[in-house]
Image: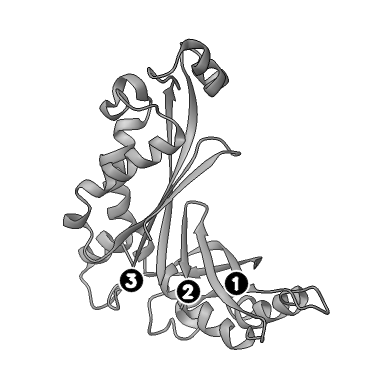
Amino acid sequence: MYITRKVEFSASHSCYNPRLSEAENRALYGEAAGSHGHGHNYVLEVTLEGEPDPVTGMVFDLKRLKEVINREVVEPMDHRFLNREVPPFDRVLPTPENLAREIWRRLEPSLRLPNARLRSVRLYETEDLFVEYSA
Amino acid sequence: MTTLTRRYRFASSHRLHSPKLSEEENCQTYGKCNNPWGHGHDYVLEVTVGGPVHPGTGRVVSPALLDGYVRENVLEAFDHRDMNRDIAAFAERVPTAENIAAVIRQMLERGWSSVFNGAVLHRIRIEETRRNSVELRNE
């Protein structure tokens, strides 16, 4: 059984790779390559997989899941400039692909139960673009 | 595994009618969708690309490259067209959402490997209305 919790956070980023030329940056990242950054209202869907606990009837306590997502993702990233304020994005480009993997890395250790585990992280950068990561 | 999904839209008309069925059977099978004059939808197409995240670019695929490829190979053929008359694949095939997804997959796969290095077409999803969707997965 899968359960999914959805949260939103707003952050700015810039996808400019200093190892590439101006033209290559434009071709790869389009307008996202502007070095001053721009922002998105990110929507994050965190999906857990597991069986309901026979006593509580829950795969995972959703209140606790909310606390973990807030602590690991929303508090450090909401209303921040990812490239400047949220490691490792001072060194790693904050593409949605890299962001989804980093979110997985932050969440996964806190979401291990005998009957449940993290299944996937889906991150919408806009309504028309999302990335899904599972390790 | 990382996948990247892009949503696209196109407006297209069709009529669901099978030459292998009688008039009555067509009417029973397809209901309102069998209207001889056809009808249209605002379709949503989701294209999902899977593959490794390139360490230099941080990307599975360039969304701009994908947009151009989908526009050229699918959207230009479908958008503001009548599928039964304007798209050869539906001369012999009923343009149900299931068949539309299969035809779009063929259109996308044709030149895929020469454009997308190492990234694979992972999934196609068509929303015909907010309540109907069809999904094809390459797994």
Placement of A8 over or under B115, stated as above or below: below
**Closer to the camera: disc 2 or disc 1?**
2
Instruction: Give the residue type that dot 3 points to.
Output: Tyr
Please give the name of the residue rendered at 44% of the width and 31% of the height, measured from the top-left corner. B96
Secondary-structure class at tag 3 = loop
Tags 2 and 1 on a common chain: yes
Is the C terminus of chain B in the top left, top right, bottom left or bottom right quadrant? bottom left
Locate residue A73: give its quadrant: bottom right
Query: In terms of depth relative to the viewer, which is nearer, A6 or B109?
Result: B109
Give amino acid for label 2.
Answer: Ser
- Answer left or right for A84 relative to B103: right
Dot label at residue A134? 2
* Mark 2–mark 3 distance (CA, rounded to whole Å): 26 Å
Marker disc for residue A16: 3
Chain ID, mark 3: A
Q: Name the secondary structure under disc 2.
A: loop
> Which of the 4 image quarters holds residue A29?
bottom left
Q: Name the residue under label 1.
A: A79
Amino acid type at circle 1 is His
